[in-house]
């Protein structure tokens, strides 16, 4: 049996396009079960929402204007439900605390469980409008998800999760990633970015798996 294809998947947990892509991610893991490995990573887009949204979107309505943009972006995708009051009352100050918890889950458990928890956290924000930047909220969600906080807390307190997150952030910069979501395949030689359709993702995976010795260049 050939070695599974490793896909590095970079997102910001607060990015609407990553939430829209969740269904595609779920379908890929089902369709290619055992043949691909999704490795979750995080990049810094919403590390400071007061600046990115409150300030940068001031001329377009600030947080409420950004919330309308999020609702409109998700509207064509029935699988990506979004609460109509998104960003109006609940305004996570940073995605970094959420990313930190997700790296702790990955370290204590596995990338697969971290992806499952990321899905739960995204649902909590985009559908339930919970403040997923709040550590108390994240801890409650983790417990409800069946995760043992006694395994997570040491990784959060001793810097292990923070180091892993900083590697993600640096790797995203080194790879020149433009945003979320970004899919890196073929040892980083292929990058798919943004609202990429399922058929495109599937075709790229199929091509790599069926032609494993084909490099990025014909030279």
Image (tube, grey):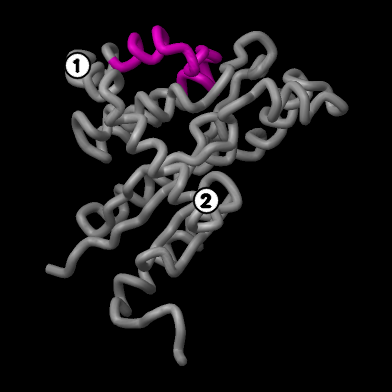
Residue 11 vs residue 82, the one in the foreground:
11
Task: Give the image location of residue 83, x and y in percent.
Answer: 60, 19
Residue 187 vs residue 200, the one in the foreground:
187
Q: Which residues are magenta?
A: 123-142
Residue indicated by mark 2: 173
Q: Which mark is residue 162?
A: none
Mark found first going from the N terminus, 1 or 2: 1
Residue indicated by mark 1: 148
Q: Is residue 78 above or below residue 31?
A: above
Report if the CB atoms under discs 1 and 2 are less than 8 Å apart. no
Residue for point 42% across, 29% down: 99
Quadrant of the image for the N terminus? bottom left
Residue for point 41% across, 64% down: 188
Q: Main secondary structure of the magenta part?
A: helix
User: How many marks do you count on the picture?
Assistant: 2
Task: Give the image location of residue 135, x and y in percent.
Answer: 41, 12
Residue for point 69% across, 30% down: 52
Q: Position of 94 compared to 72: left or right?
A: left
Q: Name the quadrant containing residue 90.
A: top right
Residue 25 vs residue 39, the one in the foreground:
39
Q: Is residue 170 above or below residue 45?
A: below
Q: Secondary structure at mark 2?
A: helix
Q: Secondary structure at mark 1?
A: loop
Residue at the extreme bottom: 219
Task: Give the image location of residue 100, x and y in percent.
Answer: 38, 27
Disc 1 to disc 2, how far (Cα)?
Answer: 32 Å
Q: Name the quadrant containing residue 26.
A: top left
Q: Position of 52 compared to 219: left or right?
A: right
Residue for point 37% across, 67% down: 186
Q: Which class describes the residues within 10 Å of circle 2: few (<14), some (14-19), or many (20+)?
A: few
Asked if residue 218 is among those painted magenta in the image, a careful observer would answer no
């Amino acid at each position: 049996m050939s070695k599974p294809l490793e896909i590095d998947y970079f997102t910001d947990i607060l990015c609407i396009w990553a939430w829209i892509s969740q269904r595609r991610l779920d379908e890929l893991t089902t369709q290619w079960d055992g043949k691909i490995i999704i490795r979750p990573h995080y990049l810094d887009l919403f590390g400071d929402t007061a600046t990115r949204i409150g300030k940068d979107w001031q001329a377009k309505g600030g947080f409420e204007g950004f919330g309308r943009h999020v609702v409109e972006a998700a509207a064509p995708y029935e699988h990506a439900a979004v609460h109509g009051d998104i960003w109006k009352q609940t305004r996570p100050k940073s995605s970094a605390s959420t990313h930190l918890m997700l790296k702790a889950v990955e370290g204590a458990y596995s990338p697969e469980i971290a992806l499952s928890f990321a899905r739960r956290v995204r649902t909590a924000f985009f559908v339930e409008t919970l403040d997923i930047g709040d550590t108390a909220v994240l801890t409650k969600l983790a417990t409800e998800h069946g995760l043992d906080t006694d395994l997570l807390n040491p990784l959060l307190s001793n810097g292990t999760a923070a180091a892993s997150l900083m590697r993600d952030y640096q790797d995203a910069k080194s790879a020149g990633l433009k945003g979320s979501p970004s899919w890196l395949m073929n040892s980083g030689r292929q990058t798919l970015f943004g609202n990429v359709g399922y058929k495109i993702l599937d075709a790229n995976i199929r091509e790599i798996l069926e032609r494993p010795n084909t490099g990025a260049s014909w030279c």
